[in-house]
Image: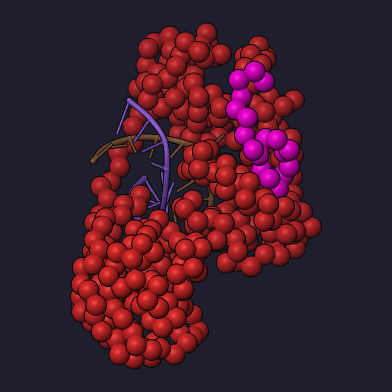
Chain colours: A red, B purple, C brown
Amino acid sequence: MKRLRAELLAWYDRSGRDLPWRRAPSPYGTLVAEFMLQQTRVASVAPRYLAFLRAFPTLKALAAARPDEVLALWEGLGYYRRATYLHAAAREAEARWGGLPDDPAQLLRLPGLGPYLAAAVASIGFGRPVAAVDGNVRRVLSRLVDRELGPREARRLAARLVDRGRPGDWNQALMDLGATVCLPRRPRCGACPLGRVCRARRRGTASLRPAPRRRRPVRAAPRPTVVVFGPRGVLLERRPPKGLLAGLWGFPGRERGGDEAAPEADDWTELARALGLVGLRPVRRRALEYRHTFSHRAWEVVVDVYRAACAREPEPAPYRWASPAELGALPLPRAFEPIRQAILDGSLGCGAGAT
DNA sequence: AATTCGGGGCA
DNA sequence: TGCCCAGAATT
């Protein structure tokens, strides 16, 4: 056991990945990185992590930030709730303790922190001897004992193994091993520092473990969408505070079959009335069609283009106008990216410059 | 226990 | 195209 720890830590010192959040480790940096890394690849996170820490270098800075600033830095990362939870956790920790607590139990009570994040911040950020079990660690341990481990069992085993001298490095070593050697589909057992004690390797079952979980098929739903060109640019709609892409800006539309009442294909006159749009007239129907697949749902987006002769200021927002320049700089979820591109390159027939 | 939350990379 | 990834909240 002791030798196993020494060998894995030696491997980590030698072959561990050089990642931005490992350069100058801090509890706050660990918190930000771990929030971003939930279900998200290292390669996607790295540039955003650097930008985020540049914008909010400290917990106090983040706690004082406006929600939109935080959300903007999350563009393209997905799981946008994380941005809200991270912000809320920062404010709460700052308000209650003037900093992050090092106690896993207290961390666990902060919004958005579950068993993994609480343990990761405590061990990596503060050096507390607790085991952080993510998907990588669970897979590594499942193979090590060649037994299907649920999250609970994995945590218990991991707690027994954790190196009390270097808990943060130990946890990260297991994760690096899972990410670079003990791969989900094609494990490189020949390069594994734990090869000699791994039961799955000995039995040749490594690639079978953990058992693949079955996934439900993604449900497809039409998503009629409008692009309205007005005197002040193009019309944007802020999405509801809960649910898919919560709180983000996008192009007005409703998912057919969703919670919200789906207007008839042509019935955007109600929108026009509500916004005080005058002289709304269709310019081009089905100007753009594409499919965007989320983790559990697929939008079949159909874009109709309208022009509004004039409009009052759409206040208070769930709506706003965006000039071409603003549109180009605005954080927008990927689901709307084809529309933005079409507007900016003028292929919607109603050039952005025309406004 | 199952579902809801994005997006990207790779076989 | 299907599968998975430094998960957690909600129901």
In this rendering, is residue A198 above or below A165? Answer: above
Query: Residue A89 at x, y = what percent?
Result: 65, 57
Query: Residue A307 at x, y = what percent?
Result: 31, 81
Query: Residue A305 at x, y = what percent?
Result: 27, 74
The mark tally for this picture is 0
Q: Nearer the viewer, residue A310 or A316?
A: A310
Residue A16 within the magenta-colored segment of the rendering: yes
Residue at 54%, 24% in the rendered image: A177
Q: Nearer the viewer, residue A343 or A252?
A: A343
**Position of C11 compared to A283: left or right?**
right
In this rendering, is residue A272 above or below A42? Answer: below
Q: Which residues are magenta?
A: A13-30
Quarter placement of the C terminus of chain A = bottom left
Quarter placement of the N terminus of chain A = top right
Residue lying farthest to the front in this orientation = A353
Task: Look at the magenta stretch and give its main secondary structure.
Answer: helix
Residue lying farthest to the right in this orientation = A98
**Position of A92 compared to A243: left or right?**
right
Instruction: Examine the image and state in which quarter residue A150 appears.
Output: top left
Q: Is residue A76 visible?
A: yes
Q: Nearer the viewer, residue A94 or A163?
A: A94
Residue A249 within the magenta-colored segment of the rendering: no
Instruction: Examine the image and state in which quarter residue A281 appears.
Output: bottom left
Q: Nearer the viewer, residue A150 or A268?
A: A268
Residue at 55%, 61% in the rendered image: A71
Residue at 77%, 54% in the rendered image: A99
In this rendering, is residue A198 above or below C2? Answer: above
Residue at 70%, 62% in the rendered image: A63
Query: Residue A309 at x, y = what percent?
Result: 34, 88
Q: Is residue A103 visible?
A: no
